[in-house]
Amino acid sequence: MSDSKDQATVQMAEPTSPSLPKDSAVTVVRSSSAVQAENENEPETPADKVDEQKKGFFAFLKTKEFYIILILGQLLAIANTSTSTFTTLLGEEGWAIPTFQTLLNYVVLTCIFTPYTIYRYGFKGWLHIILAFCDVEGNYFIVLAYQYTTMLSAQLINFWAIVVVVIISFLFLKVRYHITQIAGIAVCIGGMGVLIASDHITGTNGGDISSGNQLKGDLFALLGASFYGLTNTAEEYFVSKRPVYEVLGQLSFYGCIIDGVQSAIFERSNYHTSTWDGKVGGYLVGFTLCLTLFYCLAPLLFRLSSAAFFNVSMLTMNFWGVCIGIKVFHYHIHWMYPIAFVLIIVGQLIYYLGQRALAEARKPWLGANQEGGVAGLFTAKKRIEHVVPGGTAQSEHERVLSPEANTSAA
């Protein structure tokens, strides 16, 4: 009996030996099925839904936002060129107070945006003083540079602003540029090279190239371009997270203080030696209005595109400068200018090849659904919420940690 019992025990044990691999196989099948079911049930992110509204290599070029970006870029280039024109006219009248010249712009912006910003937020959390400082110094050194160096040198050094923007955006804002963007920038720079060559041929570079002055002007232009690159990148970051009126209100408020103090310290003697008459007053008003328009439109372009594309758009300034100069300074358009302009515009088209509907409006530092940004005019968050209501909503925990992310304003 014991033998048969032992035999039965062995027989009972034999089927259990293969049970481990069998169970293991079942477990694998269940795991794969669970993963597949999870993937099928996982909803597509709202931002991806908006991005997929347009498909293909030319997806973004089919959106209205692309044409808004192109138009905004050229409006900004024309406005900036107009400020340069008024600066040249002021120089011809013997008026040269570069810091005070831009102070009027900060005063106007402060009157427009700062009171409402203070009404909404008070003076708490105003940390944009670095942005204001870089902006003031960028304006100062660029205006100063054109008094000493040739336009050719200053324009070449201004390319440095693009380099600064790309490096800062890559390192700190986690922006990753693809091959078409690099190619687009290269084509635009090639177009600018044609403009510079045309200026060299026609001898319209201008500037004071007497001993030591050109080097001084080049250094001023390099400093100005560096400050501009930092300012553009910082402003793109701020306007993606906060309302435009708040960013401009703080920028102008601190800009007034920094600009006013700097002008009082370093330009006191210039107030007595410069010409003050009705013509100078008219030029100052024109300069201030054009620069104020520039400051009001720039944040919208930063939201729709990027600081890099903003600087690329500014490369057409020389072309618009000659167009304005035909009437004001009796310039003549060289045959190379239209070619250069077309090259820059083609470069801007190449820049956006292969990008989806949201393109650069979808900022990498704001989260997958832009939940860390403001739902304002031209922001990706606003567009996502329009297509997928509640698509950028945060959890209650995220709202507590980041209350500014839910700000819904311009």
Image (cartoon, grey):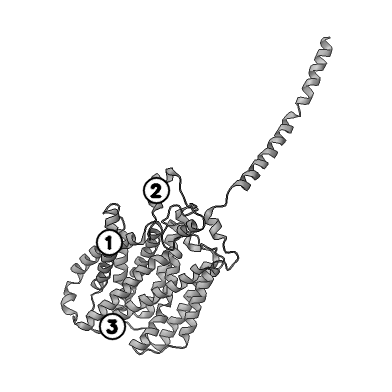
* Residue 195 position within the rendered picture, expressed as x and y whole percent measured from the top left: 44, 81
Task: Name which residue type carries label 1.
Answer: Thr
From this viewpoint, is residue 136 visible?
A: yes
- N-term-proximal mark, 2 vs 3: 3
Number of marks in the image? 3
Q: Quadrant of the C terminus?
A: bottom left
Picture quadrant of residue 88: bottom left
- Please say if 43 is above or below 74: above
Task: Mark 1 vs mark 3: give the one in front.
Answer: 1
Q: Residue at x 55, y 66 (%)?
A: 179
In the drawing, does residue 5 fall left or right of residue 241? Answer: right
Q: Secondary structure at mark 2?
A: loop
Q: Residue at x 30, y 74 (%)?
A: 289
Q: Secondary structure at mark 3?
A: helix
Crowding at dot 2, Cα within 10 Å, few <14 / some 14-19 / many 20+, comes out as some
Task: Name which residue type carries label 2.
Answer: Ser
Q: Secondary structure at mark 1?
A: helix
Between 261 and 32, the one nearer to me in the picture:
32
Check contact, mark 2 vs mark 3: CB within 8 A: no
* Residue 74 position within the rendered picture, expressed as x and y whole percent measured from the top left: 43, 75
Query: Circle 3 sits on which residue?
Result: 89
Numbered mark located on residue 114 in the image: 1
Numbered mark located on residue 402 in the image: 2
Task: Name which residue type carries label 3.
Answer: Leu
Q: Residue at x 25, y 69 (%)?
A: 103
* Residue 279 position within the rendered picture, expressed as x and y whole percent measured from the top left: 23, 83
From this viewpoint, is residue 94 visible?
A: no
- N-term-proximal mark, 1 vs 3: 3
Marks 1 and 2, Cα distance to the nearest angstrom?
A: 23 Å
- Please say if 80 is above or below 34: below
Marks 1 and 3, Cα distance to the nearest angstrom?
A: 31 Å
